[in-house]
Image: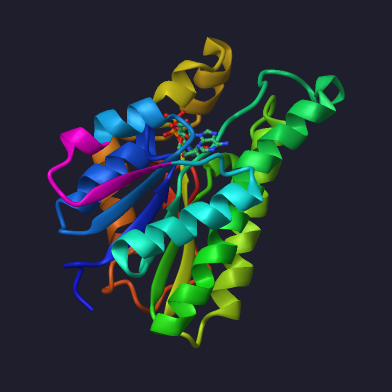
Amino acid sequence: MGTDNQVAIITGAASGLGAAIARELSQHNIHIALFDKDKEKLIELSASLEGDTEVFAVDVTNENEVKDAVAAAIKRFGTVHLLINSAGITGITNIKSHEVDTANLQAVFNVNFMGSYYTSKYVLPHMLSNNYGRILHIASIAGKEGNAGMLAYSASKAAVIAMAKVQGKEYAETGITVNALAPAVVRTALVDALPETQVKYMTDKIPMKRCGTLEELASMAAFIVSAKNSFTTGFTFDLSGGRATY
Ligand SMILES: NC(=O)c1ccc[n+]([C@@H]2O[C@H](COP(=O)([O-])OP(=O)(O)OC[C@H]3O[C@@H](n4cnc5c(N)ncnc54)[C@H](O)[C@@H]3O)[C@@H](O)[C@H]2O)c1
């Protein structure tokens, strides 16, 4: 299956990695349902893209909103082939586990894990009826390694990596692949909002001694959800400048 006329849903599309992936996929003639809670920024992005896109204001922590938005996107575009989950938050960071606020930890899990679970739950039946699909969950190096000071974020991303492993196996014989991607640091609004000591902790660990770029991220994401990437599922791709060599 070529990329022409495929349909993608991208969450967290209003900013950072999600917006960069939307830009890349729109250049491959992919129709895109842009999901984010920030409608204004989605409208701005949509206006800047040449391809066929539609804006859906959706809070991924709300199961009913996700269910309705997936149905609306499928009604608008006819079907769905690709799902990229990029909506995410760090929550409060630069704190030790005994200082973590339980409500904040739960809020981080609700976006990073539950949000990606809800979208995949409602997209998978359509992919199954097509005998084809590509799901990409954006995880993080924090989910593989556990960043000190980032319990909620690291644990929620480890859960996302586990979900990709589970779903990869569950749908392995259906034409659907499910993978994750674990970036180290790419400068976005999410990183800029972190305490500088937390950013230094993360970037100092990158052997290439630089952050990844949005272009590097978007081209790897485009490959992961391409038809050519057909024999890899349940895997967590690395984008860490050499930090994770496993
Ligand atoms: N930037 C990095 O260095 C980096 C590294 C590893 C992983 N990641 C992951 O990549 C993903 C994107 O991060 P980013 O750097 O682009 O961040 P970002 O803050 O630039 O973008 C995140 C987007 O998610 C949206 N969002 C947040 N909560 C939402 C909700 N409840 N419902 C709908 N949308 C919601 C925000 O509105 C925003 O547009 C996240 O999952 C993040 O954890 C980022």
Residue at image coords 83%, 29%? 102
What colouring method underlies this structural image?
A: rainbow
Instruction: Describe residue 166's horizontal placement relative to residue 141 as left or right.
Output: right
Residue at image coords 68%, 28%? 148
- Residue 99, percent across and down? 83, 19
Residue at image coords 26%, 28%? 44
In this rendered view, identify the residue nearer to me: 231 or 127. Answer: 127
The image quadrant that residue 103 belongs to is top right
The boundaries of the magenta stretch are: 46-56
- Look at the image and tell me whether residue 220 can be seen: yes
Q: Is residue 190 above or below residue 86?
A: above
Residue at image coords 39%, 55%? 9
Q: Does the magenta stretch include residue 196?
A: no
Instruction: Describe residue 120's horizontal placement relative to residue 97 as left or right.
Output: left
Instruction: Describe residue 2's horizontal placement relative to residue 55 as left or right.
Output: left
Q: In this view, does 215 lie above or below 194?
A: below
- Residue 149, percent across and down? 69, 24
Q: In this view, does 118 lie above or below 204?
A: below
The image quadrant that residue 107 belongs to is top right
Q: How many marks?
A: 0
Q: Quadrant of the N terminus?
A: bottom left
Q: Is residue 169 above or below residue 157?
A: below
- Residue 188, percent across and down? 39, 26
Q: Looking at this view, name the residue that lies furthest to the bottom.
A: 173
In this rendered view, identify the residue nearer to me: 76 or 49. Answer: 76
- Look at the image and tell me whether residue 187 can be seen: no
In this rendered view, identify the residue nearer to me: 145 or 112. Answer: 112
Q: Looking at this view, name the residue that lies furthest to the right.
A: 98
